[in-house]
Amino acid sequence: MRKKKRSSITVDDDSTRDVPKSKKTKSSGRPTKSSAQDSYPDSVFVQFLKEAGVTLRAGSTANEVAVDQVIFQKRLQQRLRKNPRFPNIIQEFISALEIYIEDPERFRNCLLPCVPSSSSQQDTNSGSYQESLVRLLLGIEMLQTLIINILFEKLPEFMFEGVREDGLNVPHLIINQLKWLDRIVDGKDLSSKLMQMVSVAPVEIQRDIITSLPEILEDSQHGDTAKELNGLLQQNTQLAVPILDALSSLNLSSALLSKVREAVMGTLSAVQLEDLPVVVKFVLHSISASGPNEVVCDLRKKLELEQCVLPAVLQASQSRMISKAVVPSCNNGQDSVALVLDVIKSAIRFQKTISEAWLKAIENVDESDDHKVVDLLVLFILYSTNANHSRRGAERVLKVKVRKGLIQESLLQKTFKGHAQVMRGYFPSILALAQGLLRSSDCCVVPFGGHMYKQAFTSFDSYCQQEVVGSLVTHACSGVSGEVDVALELLCELVSQGPAEMSQFTVFVKGILDYMDNLTSQQIRRLFHLLSHLAFGQEQHRGHIQDDMHIVIRKQLSSTAPKYKRIGIIGAVMMVGSMGACRYTVCWCIVMALLELVCSCSESSPEAAALYYDELANLLQTCKLDPLVQVPFVFPASVMYNLDEDESQGGIAINLLPLMTQDQQPKTDTTQPAGVKKERRVSPLCLSPFFRLLRLCEEVQHQGDLEEIDALLGCPLILTDMEVMEKVESLSKAAREFLCSLLFYTINWFREVVNAFCKLNDPEMKMKVVTRIQNITYLQSLLQTCLAATPGYTPPQANFDGESAEGMIPSSSIALPKKGKKGKDAGEISILICDHPEKECEKVKEKDAKSAVSLSSYWPFFRELDVEALSVLQCGLLSRTLLDTELHSKLKEEVQLGPAELLFLLEDMWRKLDFSLASAPAKKAPFLKSKMDRAVGFAHLQQKNAKEIATCCMELLPTLCTHLENCHNHFQTLLSEHQGVVDAPGVDVKEQQLMCSAYQLLLQVLHTTFSWAGFSGPEHRALLKSALGVLAGRLKEDETDLTLDQLSRWECRCTNFLLDVCINLVFCCSIYLEHTDDVLKAVEEIAGEGVPELMNAAKNANSRSWPTLNRQTFLVYYKSMMAELERAVRKIPPSKQMDSQESEKLLTWNLAVRDFHILINLVKMFDSRPVLTVCLKYGRLFLESFLKLGMPLLDYSFKKHKEDVQSLLKTFQLSTRQLHYMCGHSKIRQDTGLTNHVPALKKSLEQFVYRVKAMLTLNHCQEAFWLGNLKNRDLKVEMLNTDEVVHSKSHIMLDSDERNNGQEVEESDASD
């Protein structure tokens, strides 16, 4: 052993002399290190390596290097060059190498790194890591090509072996030898060999070679290699990931990169889901700063994340398999989507142009069906970035899309349902966006914020649910009325949909109880409805919630403050409703105890008792209670009607006057005879509320049949003789106030009677209802007279769910007339008491009284009419035959709505519509609250949503049109009979005033209905179509079955007067121009035909083709045409070189420029300030769109279509010249509203001048460009004095002929 070792050292040390031939010896016993010289002592390869400093080892022992790697390469190269057989010695060396590596173990050793020899371990010049022998030889230029050939020849031998037992992958080792070489002798040949190997190798080796290409090839070969990889990508999508990884690392030109990107985009739909993130990353990272919009738009169209979601059946089965731990990788689809979104987020965060391009791509989608899940996800990503412009842009685009109905709830639901796991990472953005939408002043976007809250609650985990509930509670405690309403409604929906989930967050919801002082009555109802459902749900047994609610209600009921007592009554009734809706066996005693508690606490206050009756009535109307719970609500009628027990006649009467007298008695007579039991006093305040409760109980128990109480519709009232109104000014203050209160109670009783019986179909009952409305209108006229004589009077409260009536007293400026002595007050009150109750108030002759008081300021003191009462508008002429005692026809009685009754119903309808449909967004209450609560008098209306109100209006629309036509015909007949004299002798002026007011209210009702913002949403388009169909059918009965587009077009051509008032003309014009087949043609028709007809017509006449176009509505048409024209040119696709649609686009731009020229020239005839403002604003936008989209088309089309381009520029020059004149006009007038538009417009005009010059230079026609001075002119193109404006202006010419003829093509203000 020692001899062999010493011999080995001796041979290694002597590296300068030849090695003698020796016989092969076999080792016996324990193996030791053996060199390859033992096997190949005469090999040139072994000999040269040994002389250079490398010792080859056999077996699994690594080759040893005794010198530095650079020294080894230099020695070996010198040995080869100085050898006498050079250059043939190189081939011998390579042949010996081939023979040596035929053994797989030796070949493996040559591919593995060498180790320092034992003799060189102390040498500080040798590094710790040594390259493999093959890489050392590849560093020698004269051997590199030959060794590369050997490696490629050896590679197929190991292609199908895979990973060896020792963990080595020989093909991978071979490819690694070629990476990061200092110099490649023949890079083109190497690249060719690599691509040839890719074409025949297995997939795994293909991927290895492709991903190694950037580390192997020189920069000069990157272009050719990229082209080959591009072709390979189109043939085999399995290699998409390695090819794109390689392409991302290659140094490519922008043109080649664009071509490769287009090819990648073409294969996007065929890429496997797990490869999609890499493809998207390559596309986004390869975008240049100049043109990201087109790439992002194309990527958005082809990115179908909807297909990454499994069907519902497969999702259910997969979830069951997950629970059984059978499918370990079932979320690969969601993981891939998450990776795609991470790639997009990374690109957006670090490249501002890409974020802007995504916003632009989403913003340009004009159809709701074209929006995708990726749009919402990208908006959430944009909002999650820290950049302020991205957050603001995402919120702005989302609001615009929601407002236009392009992004709808269905898309949001699809996004949450299919990608809940992915969206969980963007929950903060979703929550912040939902908060912003819910707080928005735009009522169209608020519901979408609510949908986001609901979807987040149902899709995410308990932590997110807690955040959602906490955010909604914050909204509910904000003090903003609209925000509070939406938040409470959302909480109620969440409780009804998921009571088990919401029960975990009851402690958050209970916190709203601390802010009840700022809630309205309707909001308090919703709050207690919400808490009651949490406390008494079918599956919820939350004793602590029930106890807390009982404590709060008892505390509020026991309070002496009317405000808190009102809260306690509302809360108790809502709690009864929740307990009554469920079938608890223990709820019966609780309900009875709670009802008795409310009764006992409201006995002392008539207002509280009346509110209690009203709340019970609302509960019966809106809730379906258990029959056992309904029984205690029905009180015996004797409780209220035992006041007139001595009545000898068989009929009944409402004993209102004695009831009021008894109510007033404690104020004047407080003495009580001894030994007489004190009777219970019943306040007249409770009369109407109790009747409403009684009526609803009858409806519930008898399925809507009111036969048991229908006598109350026609029964008389015990009142006073109304002849006293003739001397009302001579009465004392107490007597006048008593008379006013009597009238208020009577009117409110009749209003509740109308509410009760308005839905009956019996003609006799309908006649009585109309008669009661006539009674109301007559009594209101008397009340006006009485109120005018009673300044400072406080009417009795009629709506009890609001603040005290003292804060709603209308101010009066009428002086109090002089009265007699105060001692006459009590006596005069007694005069008013009527001894004959059978006298009816209709017998009193109507007198003309001067009234200076409008009842519109007293409407909170009248009982609310139900929406169903508006059905009386549909009643025509009603008649019945009266019979004598022998049942023979005696006479025929007819009743119909008169002008006063029509005005009464229309006024109430308009108030309801103005509250429900036209209400402005609620803002935060000011520090000093106003006296009038806007919601007072609409408690029943608030139980219905805006859609239900709009549907009711659509049902009444034919009737409203009929009344409108009748009013119109009435005035036409009146004018024809009196030769156009309105105030001719014999004309009933009062009746004409009523008809005029009814006419105006009809138009206001129609205008308010059609101006409802909800019609802009897609969910209400069917309702709008039916409404427009009704209007179309009234005037065009043969064409009622039309589409919405046809209806909108027709509405622009219908009667001028009707549409001017009842339909928003701007809305109609926008719909027509937006949905027409050709916007440019439609604009040309209106501007080229309709406007000239208007100019040639009389002063107040209309256009013959467009009846709604007159001088008053010209601005509406002009603004709509300019806006739609600018929007249409923005939709023209951008042009590219070698575009197949070049001619069509050029023709489209010619038409657009011609329309623009026509619209600009109209300013010469219509030069009002609003028209100039519209022209300056949209003229600049049109010019900017032309610079961005039109000028690139002219660059490519100038040589092919020179005449068309020249004609387009000439036409456009005329328009821009007129814009220059408008800028000068604005400076002369010094109108700030106009001059604000001038700087931006001037900038665009100058940009256009230089852009035309660039276009001519690009097409080698720069000699045609010429600048000149432009003269100062006004809007009429007349010359101006040079002192009036700045006169350094310029224009350009296209050729010498135009210069000689003086034809200007474009101009700019060079001095500004």
Image (cartoon, rainbow, N blue to C red):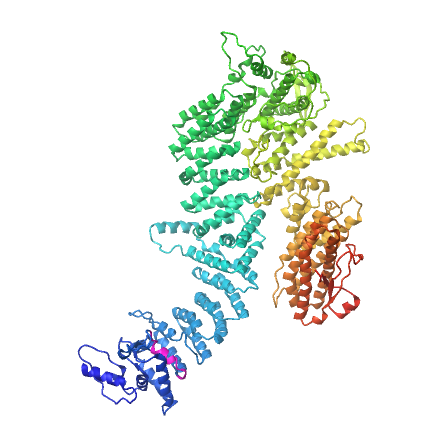
Please indicate whether residue 1284 sits to the left or right of residue 877 in the image: right
378 or 1060: which is nearer to us?
378
- Is residue 138 found inside the magenta-colored segment of the image? yes
Residue 635 in view of the camera: yes
What residue is shown at x 76% (from left), y 47% (from top)? 1104
**Quadrant housing the N terminus:** bottom left
Q: Position of residue 295 (x, y in %)?
A: 54, 62
Above or below, comparing residue 538 to residue 210 in the picture: above
Q: Residue at x 65, y 31 (%)?
A: 907
Q: Nearer the viewer, residue 705 or 65?
A: 65
Q: Nearer the viewer, residue 1235 or 167?
A: 1235
From the top left corner, tell me how far across and down residue 893 is, in percent: 68, 21
Residue at the spot x=73%, y=27% of the render? Answer: 991
Q: Is residue 489 magenta?
A: no
Magenta stretch: give its range: 129-142
Q: Position of residue 643 (x, y in %)?
A: 55, 14
Q: Front-most of 752 and 85?
A: 85
Quadrant including the C terminus:
bottom right
Tell me the residue at 38%/51% (across/down): 318
